[in-house]
Amino acid sequence: MLSQAVILVGGQGTRLRPLTYRLPKPMIPVLNRPFLEHTLAYLKSHGVGSAILALSYLPEAIQSHLGNGANHNMALSYAVEASPLGTAGAVKNAEPYLEGTFAVLNGDIFTDLNLDAMLGFHRSRGAEATIALTRVDDPCSFGVVETEEGGRVRRFVEKPSPDQVTSHWINAGVYILEPEVLRHIPQASHYMFERGLFPRLLELGEPVYGYPFSGYWLDMGTPEKYLNLNCDLLSAKVISHLIPDLSRDGVSCAADTVIHPSASISGPVVIGGGSRIDRGARITGPVVIGADCRIGEGASLERAVLWTGVSIEAGSRLKQCLVNRSETGGKEQVISFGQP
Ligand code: GDD
Ligand code: MG
């Protein structure tokens, strides 16, 4: 069993703007709980009792929320970068906290990958580094990993152009590493796994393996993927260990939610505390409504995620969208996809 994992929390999540101006990407709410809490619950379910958060963007927001991890039954440590050190540099910066074989997770992925099975594979191959691989239709925004039979990695192509795509198996952003690989990462300088350490290990002839898996996997780094993640969890396409008893086709709402008797709500729907659903409103799941929201008279919502404190005007019709309140002026901003 793995006992330690490093979670990479850097970058500004530029593709998720305007959601991440004041909130680091891993703190954005998924089913009304910060994304990172789902990741910690996932790690815990695999027996990982200690996580090191490698932070470079808005570290205080994360540290003040999670503290020492006691509320999550997890021992948390923080390795904060003065300036971004890149994915591998961030793990080097966490070296003082590491002992023995450990896992590394990109801080923006949601998966049900079986870490124990991956560790068994890593050990059986005598690997120094094992990279989880998932199959995607379009690998161009990911890192393609070519492997030989038996799983040994032959080549990496990070963010290939369409004519460079030689495989649909990509780096899923979960690694199992032996501590020895850390000696190949320069101290206190910017260095990446994807373009730096992993190709270097291949040059050195070190055993680097790819572990293909077929379970759920999603990088929630774009607004549309983020919406999909919320909807997939609501429709039980994948389960979060943080909320294992979520009502699958029903309506989970806080005790103080006020719902007008003429409103119609069909699940799966999650509603946060202090929200109010007015006369004749129609909510058709999957829908997440944050705390202190108000859905005006006759408004309709379908396949949507609303953040805290959002007010939907009477009669509005919203479908396939995210709604939050902008920092300036407190106006609602709607990010919508596809048909209105
Ligand atoms: N601490 C720290 N410091 N974390 C960082 C830094 C840094 O300087 N730079 C990036 N990160 C974190 C990000 O916050 C994210 O959690 C993770 O490292 C990966 O960075 P992304 O910016 O999300 O990369 P990507 O999605 O384009 O590509 C990566 O993930 C793909 C899978 O989702 C690569 O690893 C690809 O090869 C991979 O396929
Ligand atoms: Mg990403």
Image (cartoon, rainbow, N blue to C red):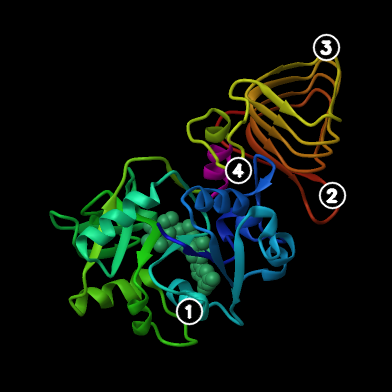
Task: Tell me where residue 82 appears, x and y as whole percent.
Answer: 61, 82
Circle 3 crowding by C-alpha within 10 Å: few under 14, some 14–19, many from 20: some
Q: Which residue is mark 4?
A: 242
Give the foreground label among 3 and 2. Answer: 3
Q: Are marks 3 and 4 in contact (CB under 8 Å)?
A: no
Looking at the figure, which quarter contains the C terminus? Answer: top right
Residue type, label 3: Ser
Decide whether the magenta segment is chiefly helix, strand or loop.
helix
Rounded to the nearest angstrom, the CA distance separating label 2 from label 4 is 30 Å
Residue type, label 4: Leu
Q: From this view, report whether residue 198 is shown above or below residue 338.
A: below
User: Does the rendering let one see residue 10?
Assistant: no
Q: Which element type, helix, strand or loop, lies under badge 3?
A: loop
Rounded to the nearest angstrom, the CA distance separating label 3 from label 2 is 29 Å
Q: Is residue 26 left or right of residue 126?
A: right
Residue stretch in magenta: 221-230
Q: Which mark is residue 86?
A: none
Q: Which element type, helix, strand or loop, lies under badge 4?
A: loop
Q: In the rendered structure, which disc, 1 or 4, sits on the residue that comes first in sequence?
A: 1
Q: Which residue is mark 2?
A: 330
Q: Which residue is mark 1?
A: 95
Q: In the rendered structure, which disc, 3 or 1, sits on the residue that comes first in sequence?
A: 1
Rounded to the nearest angstrom, the CA distance separating label 3 from label 1 is 58 Å
Q: From this view, report whether residue 216 is shown above or below residue 246.
A: below
Q: Are marks 3 and 1 in contact (CB under 8 Å)?
A: no
Residue at 46%, 50% (x, y): give it.
46
Rounded to the nearest angstrom, the CA distance separating label 1 from label 4 is 28 Å
Task: Tell me where residue 262 appears, x and y as whole percent.
Answer: 83, 11
**Is residue 223 located in the magenta-colored stretch of the structure?**
yes
Give the foreground label among 1 and 2. Answer: 1
